[in-house]
């Protein structure tokens, strides 16, 4: 506790402001730079400030792990909500598929496509794609927006096509005389080897 000062006979003098003190130092020292040791020496920490600083540091040390846990839990909640939404979407798709299976026309079309069933009296043609995938046509070049004229000798191509068709050997054998049914040879012929 401070004791009240005894009254003095001198009138109190006003304290100089910071700028006046800095200018007074600059005029005395001749330079306007501040020495870091003087600046650090002028900082005074009270016990209250030290205790408050220690409490802030302790609060940070205590709260950082719990804040990290909180953020991790929020991330897990978002992941779980996303998973629930994906599952709801899948359930909705399965419900739509279930409704489609209640339609007799859909069942008939699926039986035709998947199981190759047919209705009585229908004839089904199955086409087997026996071509090698390497023989599939390549992707065509992109189509340009501009019209281009291609030089071609279409008359020569037409004449060659007609000539080849006229000079080609017979592609289809004539029909057999015994009613249109080909029969295998009764005796197999041996090939010389």
Image (tube, rainbow, N blue to C red):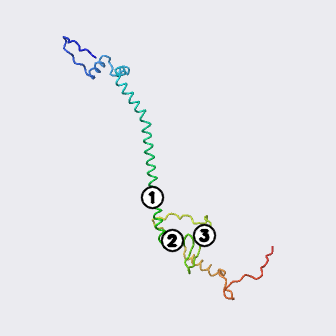
Residue 52: quadrant of the picture: top left
Q: Is residue 134 left or right of residue 146?
A: right
Residue 35: quadrant of the picture: top left
Mark 3, residues whose alpha carbon is within 10 Å: few (<14), some, or many (≥20)?
Answer: few
Quadrant including the N terminus: top left
Mark 1, residues whose alpha carbon is within 10 Å: few (<14), some, or many (≥20)?
Answer: few
Residue at the disc numbered 2: 107
How far across and how far down the image is residue 60, in percent?
41, 33
**Relative to the observer, which residue lies in front, 37 or 140?**
37
Q: Residue furthest right?
A: 193
Q: Is residue 3 left or right of residue 100?
A: left
Q: Earlier in the sequence, mark 2 or mark 1?
A: 1
In what element is the residue under mark 1? helix
In what element is the residue under mark 3? loop
How far across and how far down the image is residue 164, in percent?
62, 78
Q: Earlier in the sequence, mark 1 or mark 3?
A: 1
Q: Which numbered marker is on residue 129? A: 3
Circle 1 or circle 3, nearest the eye = 1
Q: Are marks 1 and 3 in contact (CB under 8 Å)?
A: no
Decide: is 21 above or below 127: above
How far across and how far down the image is residue 132, in percent?
62, 66
Residue 3, visible in the rendered structure: yes
Residue at the disc numbered 1: 89
Quadrant including the C terminus: bottom right
Spatial separation of the CA atoms under disc 1 and disc 3: 36 Å
**Relative to the observer, which residue lies in front, 148 or 21?**
21
**Relative to the observer, which residue lies in front, 160 or 16?**
16
Name the residue: 42% across, 33% down. 62
């Amino acid at each position: 506790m401070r004791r009240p000062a005894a009254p003095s006979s001198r009138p109190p003098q006003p304290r100089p402001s910071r700028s006046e003190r800095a200018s007074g130092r600059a005029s005395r020292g001749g330079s306007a730079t501040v020495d870091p040791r003087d600046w650090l020496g002028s900082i005074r920490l009270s016990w209250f400030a030290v205790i408050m600083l220690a409490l802030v540091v302790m609060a940070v040390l205590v709260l950082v792990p719990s804040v990290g846990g909180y953020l991790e839990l929020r991330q897990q909640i978002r992941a779980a909500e996303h998973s629930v939404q994906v599952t709801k979407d899948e359930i909705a798709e399965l419900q739509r598929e279930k409704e489609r299976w209640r339609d007799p026309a859909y069942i008939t079309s699926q039986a035709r496509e998947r199981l190759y069933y047919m209705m009585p009296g229908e004839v089904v043609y199955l086409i087997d794609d026996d071509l090698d995938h390497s023989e599939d046509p390549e992707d065509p070049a992109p189509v340009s927006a501009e019209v281009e004229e291609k030089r071609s000798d279409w008359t020569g191509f037409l004449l060659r096509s007609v000539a080849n068709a006229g000079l080609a050997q017979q592609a289809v054998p004539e029909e057999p005389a015994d009613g249109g049914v080909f029969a295998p040879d009764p005796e197999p012929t041996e090939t010389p080897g």
